[in-house]
Amino acid sequence: MIEAIRKRRSIRNFLKRDVEEEKLNEVLKAAMFSPNSWGTRPWEFIVVRAEETKKALAKASPHAGFVDKAPVVIVVCFDTKKGKRFKEDSAIAAEHIHLEAVNQGLASCFVQIADAGDPPGTAEPLVKELLGIPEDCRVMCLMPLGYAARELKEHADSEYDPVKVHLERF
Ligand SMILES: Cc1cc2nc3c(=O)[nH]c(=O)nc-3n(C[C@H](O)[C@H](O)[C@H](O)COP(=O)(O)O)c2cc1C
């Protein structure tokens, strides 16, 4: 596990190579194995491959501009009728996507949609309108998925900072 965690970097450039359906399914399975508050499994995932839609998603936030370079974009949504912990449940599912992507030889990046955009808060309604997401659903992030055009340096032991660890009291 620590190997995948070390390798996981935010990748923003992708090869023009499609993601195999089996790999995509494993990534989505990992998302649905996430811990979730009260076991309500409140997530919904939209898989976007259409070029025009990806281009529109790339315009949702000033920090999303590269998502159309990925062959697949997974949109991580949350049904507020089912769950109460939007941010926690969605972010954990996104991280499962990120790590299983690495395990499958793929790469991703967490691209914030909730509270994002210019001005802030405009990204989510834009994505909801574009993808026909119901009123009761929130959108946390986009997870572009593909083969990295260039690998980034793995996380290193030097990033472990013992000063950040407090024994018994802060
Ligand atoms: C909550 C959250 C929001 C993020 N939003 C964006 C984003 O909108 N666009 C982007 O390119 N990267 C985004 N990132 C990725 C971070 O920039 C990245 O994780 C950080 O720089 C550390 O680099 P690493 O993931 O390669 O270790 C986000 C990450 C998190 C956890």
Image (cartoon, helix red, strand yellow):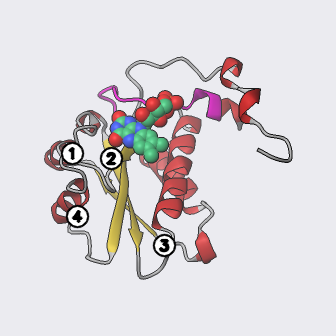
Tag 2 residue: 73
Instruction: Please give the range of residues in magenta.
Output: 5-19
Whichever of callouts 4 and 2 sits on the residue coming sooner in the sequence is: 2
Q: Position of residue 38 (x, y in %)?
A: 62, 77
Dot 2, crowdedness within 10 Å: few (<14), some or many (≥20)?
many
Tag 4 residue: 128
Quarter holding the N terminus is top right
The image's mark for residue 42 is: 3
Secondary structure under the numbered disc 1 in the rendered image: helix
Respond yes or no on whether mark 1 lies under 8 Å from ligand 1. Answer: no
Dot 4, crowdedness within 10 Å: few (<14), some or many (≥20)?
some
Residue at mark 2 to residue at mark 3: CA–CA distance: 19 Å
Looking at the rendered structure, the number of numbered marks drawn on it comes to 4
Residue at mark 4 to residue at mark 3: CA–CA distance: 17 Å
Residues at badges 1 and 4 in contact (C-beta under 8 Å)? no
Q: Is the residue 51 above or below the residue 106 in the image?
A: below
Q: Looking at the image, which is closer to me, 170 or 48?
A: 170
Q: Is the residue 61 above or below the residue 85 in the image?
A: above
Kindly report the secondary structure that dominates the magenta region of the rendered protein: loop
Secondary structure under the numbered disc 4 in the rendered image: helix
Residues at badges 1 and 2 in contact (C-beta under 8 Å)? yes
